[in-house]
Amino acid sequence: MSLRRAVLLINLGSPVSTSIWDVRRYLNEFLMDSRVIDYPWILRRLIVGLFVLPFRPYKTAAAYKRVWLEEGSPLLATSKGLQKALAKLIELPVYLGMRYSEPSTRATLELIQHEQEGKIDDVLLIPLYPHYAMSSYESVVVKVREELDKMKWPVTLTVLPPFYEDPLYVKALEESIRPHLEKPYDHVLFSYHGVPERHLKKGDCTKAHCAIRENCCEVPSAVHDVCYRHQSVETTKMMAARLGMPEGKFSSSFQSRFGKEVWCEPYTDEELVRLAKSGVKHLVVLCPAFVSDCLETLEEIGMEGKHEFLEHGGESFTLVPCLNTHPLFVEALAHWSKEFAAPKAGVGMRGSLKGIETTIQREDDRQ
């Protein structure tokens, strides 16, 4: 008897509305994740409860109002569109859940179980993050496993590895960027979501490479399987080469830092000002760490970042949309899903989860 399979897409999530209460509830769930703020629970609770939730929800709610759509948050609306587009290309049932807020991971798993009458044998989990990071990809994998354990549902979970260098993804990203480079530009800035430098060191099983060895992202290492910064740098290099960007006309930066500790550098907000002051007049910005446009791309970069760049001397600012429902990205997801549905499920998928599984297990032990 053939196995019954389903595909589960998981994205970050967003508040259910722009009300202060809903934003506060979302931020609490997000920031209390031990893989986002990886301090002991009591310290994390104090930081979030005393220094974040009394103030940040007001600012964040105002930001969400600037990008909110009639159908809800941009991230949720686009993710639903991606789910529908993928479902049209494959015969497997496709479900969508969010790591935080609604539809929750648990509710989505229960929906799969209910709609498929408990006959699903294997679920392909696709974390909608091209790169590996403890606070994104790893958090999704751990959360799904925890919920399955609580449900006591003996379904097999197959996890798609980070796909930042998969040829199909690379081609989709390349073609989504290309039209925006047809007009003359002075510089292209690849802005990735930031992570604390501490997270990189924590994922380094050798404890002698990340942020320690000179040019650590350039020196080959098994650590790179779980190194967000290395994978981001590689994405920039691949895109620059494929799109023929001259040396010196592109660079990488990291956005959305939180707190006072050192995060991946350089910081996007500072780079936007620096580039403008250095004489860059026509800037193109893209955010390859996100597959769906969201608050961090539309408001933080597309509005606040644009304002800073123009305020300090820039003349034109082009934000390249995320992949969203780009046909080539949907086709890539369909290809990976069909490989999963084949008799030898998962064979041919890029990469291996071996190193990743080791890291996740180590983090589980730490908790």
Image: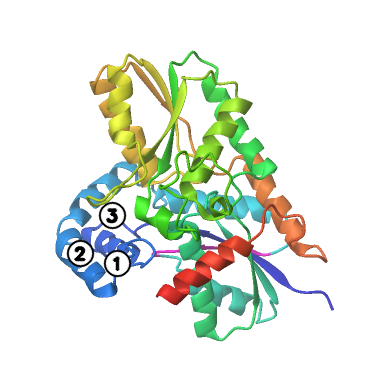
**Tag 3 or tag 2, which sits nearer the N-term?**
3
Q: What residue type is labelled 1?
A: Tyr
- Select label 1 or label 2 by which is in front: 1
Judging depth in this view, the residue of 224 and 42 nearest the camera is 224
Q: Is residue 106 shown left or right of residue 66?
A: right
Within 10 angstroms of label 2, few (less than 14), some, or many (20 or more) residues?
Answer: some
Q: What residue type is labelled 3?
A: Thr
Q: Is residue 58 shown left or right of residue 205?
A: left
Range of magenta residues: 93-101
Q: What residue type is labelled 2?
A: Ile
Residue designated by label 2:
47
Q: Is residue 205 above or below residue 120?
A: above
Residue designated by label 1:
39
Measure how far apart labels 1 and 2 are at the Cα level.
10 Å
Q: Does the magenta stretch include residue 97?
A: yes
Q: In this view, does 20 lie above or below 243?
A: below
Within 10 angstroms of label 3, few (less than 14), some, or many (20 or more) residues?
Answer: many
